[in-house]
Amino acid sequence: MTWNGTMVDAADTETYYLHLSAFPCEKCNGPVIAGSLGTRHDHISKETDIRKIGAACIACGFVPEFMIEPAPEHCFRPVEWKWTIKDRPHLVPPGSLSLQADLPLEQKS
């Protein structure tokens, strides 16, 4: 029920938030960007169901198996995520695949 008394479906009131943070890569000391998603079930409730969605070094592509707790100054403000994430049936275990193989090679001029 909304503040003015109208009934709404629970799916219409859920809001998802993307959380990003950074910490140094254990291989190259480059920035590892880690992400998580949280859910607010309505406009007045606290964010719950916070789940990690992955991390990768943007310098070398290494995917760490364990994530370091970032310093508070390396945590970015959450943003609303309006898109539904599709199910991923073929999950890759953390640390078993590097993103570097999927990235295009830099062209030297």
Image (cartoon, rainbow, N blue to C red):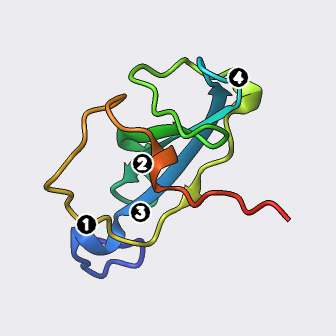
Give the left or right position of residue 30, taking residue 97 as reference.
right
Residue type at mark 2 is Leu
Which quadrant of the structure image shows residue 105? bottom right
Give the Cα distance between marks 2 and 3.
10 Å
Which residue is more in the foreground, 22 or 37? Answer: 22
- Of labels 1 and 3, earlier in sequence is 3
Judge whether 103 appears above or below 98 on screen: below
Number of the front mark, 2 or 1: 1
Q: Say which quadrant the C terminus sits in.
A: bottom right
Tag 4's secondary structure? loop
Which quadrant of the structure image shows residue 26? top right
Contact flag, marks 1 and 4 (Cβ < 8 Å): no
Tag 1's secondary structure? loop
Residue type at mark 3 is Thr
Number of the front mark, 2 or 4: 4
Judge whether 22 appears above or below 8 on screen: above
- Of labels 2 and 4, earlier in sequence is 4
Which quadrant of the structure image shows residue 87? bottom left
Contact flag, marks 1 and 3 (Cβ < 8 Å): no
* Residue, far right: 109
Number of the front mark, 1 or 3: 1
Which residue is more in the foreground, 64 or 70? Answer: 64
The numbered mark at residue 37 is: 2
Q: Say which quadrant the N terminus sits in.
A: bottom left
Give the Cα distance between marks 2 and 1.
13 Å
